[in-house]
Image (tube, helix red, strand yellow):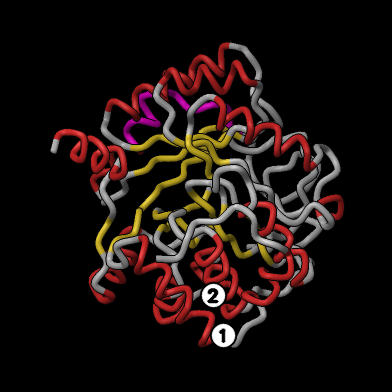
Amino acid sequence: MSAIRNDWTIQEIQEIYHSSLLELVFRAASVHRQYNDTAEVQVCTLLSIKTGGCSEDCAYCPQAARYNTGVEVQPLMKKEEVLAYAQKAKDAGSTRFCMGAAWREVRDNRDFDRVLDMVRGVNEMGMEVCCTLGMLTPSQAQKLADAGLYAYNHNLDTSKEHYSEIISTRTYEDRLSTLENVRKAGVTVCCGGIIGLGETHNDRINMLHTLSTMPEHPESVPINALVAIAGTPLEHNSKVDTWDMVRMIATARILMPATMVRLSAGRTEMSVAEQALCFMAGANSIFAGDKLLTTPNPSFEEDDAMFKLLGLMPRVAFKEEKEYRAEMIS
């Protein structure tokens, strides 16, 4: 079995990333088979619980207040509305529910208390609950953990070298600091990036190097294709080639064998055959539901039909914890 390593070199990753595509997919599929049930895909649902009006200047994001993208600013949703949406997602096969708020950072106020209450509510439904709320302090990460948070999403977006071309309102170190706070609180880490931001292949390799050389690999790595939104600085960027997504997913799978590699934004532009290649290359998680925060996404019904065609089944919630408990009992 391929060993799980945290000491990958840039040169090793370059050699993997630039290898012949069919050989790369075959190698990634072989690693995937060693560590995961290849028929199993985790279905996650992402809901924007507070939309628009963000003070950040992320060049890809329609929720930034400084861009005119047509996104309406909406206040924090009520707990009852969020739990109703979570129940709908659970009924449709989702086992992880992620709540996103367009904040630069979490503040210790009434809104954060309301989010903690939402976390408790979703956790009680038996779903893995995830949040993406911006930067966190150690005490805020601990409060989320105490409320039952299973995962926290905080993407690197791109390489450290390309980062300043995309965002100026927070640093790469800020992102790494939040991830460290999440890890110390005992919450699992969901951290990946976006391709199609005008970065080079080396930028993609450098981002994968940062992720794969963390002391512990993120439990979940979303690979997003840019959805170019009118009104953002990147609105004229070209569509990401499917082969680039396959290459990124395959390389991520080889570097981080046991991680959930998430085929995320951009699926509406991909055929079932193209998505099947991504699953073959090692993707074993998707976001389901009509929207990813504010951008389009395939419907539950479309994904259900794809799963049936490809012989895929949704991964159960808390699978690793359940397997661990079963081993301890036996």
Residue in the image at 70% along x and 65% along y: 205
Q: Nearer the viewer, residue 304 or 318?
A: 318
Q: In the image, is residue 41 above or below residue 294?
A: below
- What segment carries the magenta color? 74-85
- Residue placed under numbered mark 2 in the picture: 246
Which is more foreground, mark 2 or mark 1?
Answer: 1
19 displayed left or right of 330 = right
Q: Secondary structure at mark 2?
A: helix
Instruction: Tell me the quarter of the image containing the N terminus.
Output: bottom left
The kind of residue tagged 1 is Leu
Q: Would you say residue 180 sits in the magenta stretch?
A: no
Q: In the image, is residue 164 above or below residue 184?
A: below
Residue in the image at 48% along x and 46% along y: 219
Q: Nearer the viewer, residue 293 or 133?
A: 133
Q: Percent position (x, y) of residue 202?
A: 77, 69
Q: Quadrant of residue 307?
A: bottom left
Instruction: Tell me the quarter of the image containing the C terminus.
Output: top left
- Residue placed under numbered mark 1 in the picture: 21
Q: Nearer the viewer, residue 93 or 182?
A: 182
Q: Quadrant of residue 201?
A: bottom right
Q: Percent position (x, y) of residue 113?
A: 51, 14
Q: Residue furthest left?
A: 330
Q: Percent position (x, y) of residue 92?
A: 26, 51
Circles 2 and 1 in contact, beta carbons < 8 Å: yes
